[in-house]
Amino acid sequence: MFVVSAALTGAWNLWFSSTQVGFVNYQVINLGQISKANHNSFIKISEISTDELDDLDTYDMVFINAMGLRITEEQRAQIQKAADGGLPVLTTAATNPANKIISLDSIQADTLKHYLSNGGRRNYRSMLNYVRVHIDKKLFSVSEPEAVMKRADDVLYHMDPKKPEDEELGFNTVAGYNTFLQHNGLWKENAPRIIVTGPMGEPSGLIAKLEETGNMVYPIRSMRSFIQNHGIDSVRPSAIINMAHGRMGEPIVDYLAKQNIPLFSPLNVNRLVEEWERDKMGMNGGFMSQSIVTPEIDGAIRPFALFGHYKDEEGLQHAYAIPERLETFVETVNNYIALQRKPNSEKRVAIYYYKGPGQNALTAGGMEVVPSLYNLLQRMKREGYKVDGLPTSSKELEQMIQSQGAVFGSYAEGAFDRFMETGKPELITKEQYESGELSAATVLAELGGFDLAGMTGLFLGGAAAKIPVLTDGFLSTVSGLLAVLIRKEAKDYMLASHISTEPAGAAVLQMLDLPAPLHMGMHLGEGSGAVAMIPLLRMGAKVYEEMSTFSDISVEQYVDYQEKGERP
């Protein structure tokens, strides 16, 4: 009986058991595509980290992407030992010749390389079947692999709406792609056309959301060839979305600049979303330079973390658009496109200008602020923007700014009162404010600058992370008030440092019901109050944490003799 059982177990392991395929140093997007191509439950795919190379003997086949592979001599020896011991290993794209470890015969290696290089779901599926049949020698639950399908030279692609899990459809001409859109209910007459390109995201969710919100999407494999072959001239895109890692190149940038096409560069955080959300740093410098800095050199706007990694049931990572961020990003793109189509006369533009220290200072870095601003407003008026009440000279504009955009520092005595009388302020009633008609977010959007918005976000972020934040002076306290109006819980993590001498400084602290320990007559706006407060907080914390109790120093407890009816 034992012999029969052993024989059955051996036969199962030899012919019927699952094929374990490991991948080392493969990009999540690429490995995700290979995983999606696998329809055979008897083929198991795993990602192997460089810390797990001592477990290679548990696999039936190992693929190694050696481009940029960083391993120690010991780790390289582990791979070589496994290969010498009979493990099928295929290494591709070895930038370091020492990492080129292959234990397959030349026919097997070349076949697998061709499947990999040509890509696509059918090739990946055949590659995995090939491993099971011809390398792992399993006979059960496997299809004979198809011959290698050469990579299509098509420029445009789109998933088949009727077969979303099947191979992406390719198109060599814009006309052919447009016909596909018409046949599948995706054609929208006069709709904005958006090009999606770049290697650093999995665009299916983005494409679907852009189409859902009224756009026609043109996914492009190669922007360079699409421009060179004049395909882009037939599309006339309203925007281009490049899932960037590095620059697109000068010819592409020149074309976009001449055609005035906005370029967006959403980011892949390139790690598990939950890990990224917990990480206070978010991303490292090298990643930021390739995915934020260099795309901005190309003119990309609104760098936005859009893609991230999620684990499937088997623990394999896949790249997807982060749902809540996808909504925001697509809304932003649509808003920019809508702005392009809006007449200049209907656009509302806010201009932030530099106002230096002092009541009358209107210079910045040697540049004359008011004449420059005046020239800009004249240009905008010529181009159809509604610029009402523009005076006849920059001197008159300066006088208008001084009266209607006054500075209310303590050095400008009486400025506030004069402004209220002659500066044409926008007034709201107490009832409007208390009813919430004018929300904190609206006030911030209409009247606040980037500095106030940033500080408001800091107070909200501190509360979310349960980190106390110090207010300092009038402006930061106003931001603290806005944060509390947005989320009242923010006050629980807010500490006041000092009362500024600005007229509204004490009033805002009173609205927040925050006592300020320091009364030093400061109005510097340089964080001095908060800096002065930190040693006091540290001292208080040290006393609280380290002060000895009576029992620690053997002091007898106090006795209330009056309560006991006794005299001491």
Image (spheres, grey):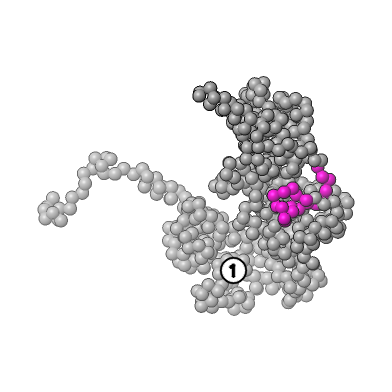
Residue 181 place in picture, x, y as percent: 78, 59
In this picture, is 439 found above or below 257? below
Of residues 498 and 439, the one drawn nearer to the viewer in this rendering: 439
Whether residue 187 can be seen here: yes
Q: What residue appears at the point 18 percent right and 50 percent down from the top-left corner?
A: 559
- Residue that appears at 81% across and 70% down: 383
Q: Could you tell me which secondary element the residue under label 1 belongs to?
A: helix
Label 1 Cα crowd, 10 Å radius (few <14 / some 14-19 / many 20+): few
Q: Nearer the viewer, residue 132 or 514?
A: 132
Residue 455 left/right relative to 200: left
**One can see residue 117 in this view:** no
Q: Does the magenta segment cover residue 104?
A: no
Residue under label 1: 442
Q: Vertically, is 143 above or below 247?
A: above
Question: Dividing the picture into quarters, in which one does residue 351 lie?
Answer: bottom right
Using the rendered view, name the quadrant where residue 415 is placed. bottom right
Q: Tell me which segment is drawn in magenta.
A: 151-169
Q: Position of residue 387 (x, y in %)?
A: 74, 73
| 443 or 373, nearer to the observer | 443
Q: Is residue 515 above or below residue 167?
A: below
For this view, does 286 lie left or right of residue 158?
Answer: left
Instruction: Give the percent coordinates (x, y) of residue 557.
Output: 21, 46
